[in-house]
Amino acid sequence: MNDPHLLSLTVNGTEQEVVVEPRRTLADVLRHDLRLTGTHVGCEHGVCGACTVLLDDAPVRACLVFAVQAEGAEVRTVESLDAEGRLSDLQQAFSDHHGLQCGFCTPGFLMLAEGVLDEQPDASREEIREALSANLCRCTGYQTIVDAVHATACSRRQEIPS
Amino acid sequence: MTATELPGDGHATEPRAEGPRFDGHRGRWVGASIPRHEDPRLLTGRGRFVDDITLSGMLHAGFVRATVAHAQITGIDLTATRAVEGVVAAYDASDLALGDIVALLDRPAEEFTPTAMPILAKDKIRFVGEPLAIVVARDPYAVEDGIEAAVVEHTALDAIVDEETALRASTTVHDEAPDNVLLDVSMFDTPGVDEAFADADVTVEVTTRSGRQNALPLETRGVVVSWDARDDQLLVQTCTQVPHQVRTLVARCLDVPERTVRVTVPDMGGGFGQKCVVGREEVAVAAVAQRLHRPVKWIEDRREALTAGFLAREQTYRTRAAFDADGHITALDVDVVCDMGAYSCYPFTAGIEPLMASAEMPSVYRVPAYRVRGRALTSNKAPTAPYRGVSRPQYVVAIERVMERAARELGLDPVEVRRRNVITEFPYTGVNAVTYDPGTYRESLDLAEATIRDEGWYELRESTDRHIGIGFCCFSERTGYGSEAFAKRKMTVVPGFDLSEIRMDTTGAVVVTSGTMNHGQSHETTFAQIVADRLGIDTARVKLRQGDTERIAYGWGTFASRSVTIGGSAVALASQRLGELLCRIAAHLLETRPDNVALDGDGGVVQLDDPDRRLTYEDIADVAYLRSHLLPKDVEPALTATASFDVPGDGTFSNATHAVVVEADPGTGAIRILRYACVEDCGVVIHPKVVEGQCRGGIAQGIAGALFEEITYDAHGEPSAASFIDYLVPTATEIPDVSIAHLETPCAFTENGAKGAGEGGTIGAPAAVLNAVNDALRHTGVELDATPIHPRVVLDALEGGL
């Protein structure tokens, strides 16, 4: 049951091959095998959302996905968002609105928000709040996270006239 | 210590302008919401939290933990564990032979009973989740396999799970405390209490209770320990709020000199007090890393964090208060009982909650006579650490409920009763022998009430059949606990001062140290603002260093909202001294008198009588390091300065009023918050967005305690909440938007005029929410005095009252 498995997946545009035990989670492969430690692990039972990544463009809990389930998939993590250190519009909005304090939940919120903005580009502030209730933050009280994502949604809507 | 003169007394300020500003007094940076220095790395996934650290040859550790609450250990067999594939070693208490964690108070035996917390349980299990053995393996998966293979034999004992079973004392948690009481202090019994009750027009009695909560940093506890043979030193990389205290206990428990232990702190994902005590796991991991001479990592999982991490807040207040016919309080008589769980935490002891409550209970009110008894009980539950606010959310609930009850008895408006009692003249020395520095107690109350009134919430409440309630909470918070104030608690380890060292390099950039410990509070930004203003340089040229026992001579870390008041003052003083040194050297090089030069606010020193003559910091640094033969004869090479700061006397108090409008759902009993307004005064605001963030985050945690979060235990001591399925952490849909209005009463004796802002939100929210819920239920005749407020209780009230 614990025989190693050769896993192939694409992470942030780069093809990767990793030898994993079947029980190894995607979060552990990203963090400890590929050393992409931006994805954080907060509860290991799929509630807090700190480990949220995009799996084939949809937000998932990387702690609840076995790595072998990501065979052949495209994974995007927080490390994909900036361009050589230049913050994306969403990251900049988090900074502008003070949407992070300790920063531990932040990568999960960023990836969740990218998924939400992709799936619901016309989302209202309240719809964004509802969607962001998937993840936990212990520092901010959420208001400034909602503000940051809403501001990004508004600016992206202006950039792409509907 | 030099007091900095700052203008103005308490007055409402206009919303602050964004970006750098000049006002002649506070310089360019303080008061501006500049981009946080921490943000770029945290937003791009390039922070470095403890679990992000991987060292060559690193092993992983986990703990065999108790599955019963109270038992005599008859055997721990790790044979099968050691045989598990991937397991490298497994140890119980007898294998490691470590010293115990002992926290003491300088109080007589009738007041305080010292108890020991072993690193791994020795003879006895005292709570579900207690660590019994440590398993070390090549990866965390093998660690779990090894833990499963461990065999623990024990003889179960009756569990102490509440005040009743503790005080009945049919069994004891610690032999040293046969009555299960670790602390029993009657801190005040001032003259006139009984007379005031005898003469009272109205006497109210309220029993308030609060549930056991987890501070719940989203990053669980964790540590990586490695042995550095070259430095002859254990390197303990841990997420702690108190690195020097961890160093002391690791050295003490391992019986090695402190020099051989270095504690560093990487990025930290919150703490809220849970990480301001030393964890036994940190010590155990250090011991096995020392023994194996291999790096060892332990990362607490969420189940451990919820059941075996430090908890807080399980308290009962039996409060009696006497009032005259005009609604003035004339006496307060309180019995405080805190269920501290199985052990006394280091360095604060099990006295932390009852002593805080006893010292501060009169709150923002003029109370002429005061009697209080505070007790810390021990039980078979996970132990208690300080949690954001420490007892203040609870005693504020007690006294704010007293105000509400008195208002009902007297037929007065509850805000009016507060107005008649609140302290308005400062400095005010209370019946609790504490002197309160100036604040805006009355002003914040008036503004909060006006906000709610002007927005029409009272009209809505009166004109609808919806169950809408309005609640207030007025409070202050001591944020500058110096050594004098902590010494009054009679701790044997007395926190208070902070140290700072500043160094300027040859390019004119500075590195400044602080003994405080950032974990979300934005110190890297706010301290840089303070330094930048003192030296007249850009904040980008200031780097803050914290969390390294090799670089910081000593520090008390971050807790009790102390960082900007004390640590911020120390970095300001160190910066000022460096500025003085720069001026001395510049005067010599400019061949003028020392009093004829000044910092020019733009990275240089200018000659006052000839402003064309100016030296940049680079010019001066060039001499201080690279051409030291040009220095004045009495100035040593290098550009460094150090300073310490301690808050004198009773410290400083931030204050606030919270106003809440809630609606109770008649179908479910759920409480929805319709409006939350906070009017706060934390003195000079260094960074408005950071202060607002602290307020909102604190309020969210206060709402969590008021409405959602609780760990209960069954009669056998089994905890109810071992996952986020049962421990109800509020999300973005439960926490409302919060408006924040700033009042500003500069502190006269901190360097920057700032008071602390870390805890206030958490302190005010439970009472404000509870009062609002009771207002929503006012027609039912039911008054609630316990948190969290369960929907079932609200529903029963609504159904019973309709």
Image (spheres, rainbow, N blue to C red):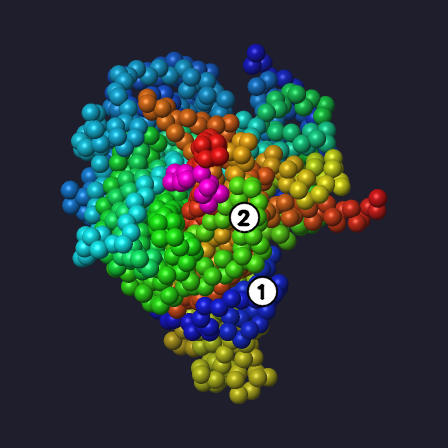
Closer to the chain start, of discs 2 and 1, is 1
Magenta region = B775-787
Q: Chain for mark 2?
A: B
Tag shown at residue B461: 2
> Mark 2: which amino acid?
Arg
Q: Is residue B783 magenta?
A: yes
Q: Is residue B771 magenta?
A: no
Residue B706 location in percent, x, y?
Answer: 45, 40
Residue drawn at (61%, 45%), measured in percent from left and top?
Answer: A145
Q: In the picture provided, is B107 more to the left or to the right than B340?
A: left
Residue B682 is at least partly visible in this image: yes
Residue drawn at (20%, 47%), measured in percent from left and top?
Answer: B186
Residue drawn at (72%, 25%), measured in percent from left and top?
Answer: A73
Secondary structure found at label 1: loop
Which residue in the protein does label 1 denote? B16
Using the image, determine if residue B201 lies above or below residue B239. below
Tag shown at residue B599: none
Secondary structure found at label 2: helix
Residue furthest right as drawn:
A162
Residue A69 location in percent, x, y?
Answer: 66, 21
**How many dots with numbers?**
2
> Mark 1: which amino acid?
Arg
Q: CA distance from mark 2 to mark 1?
A: 33 Å
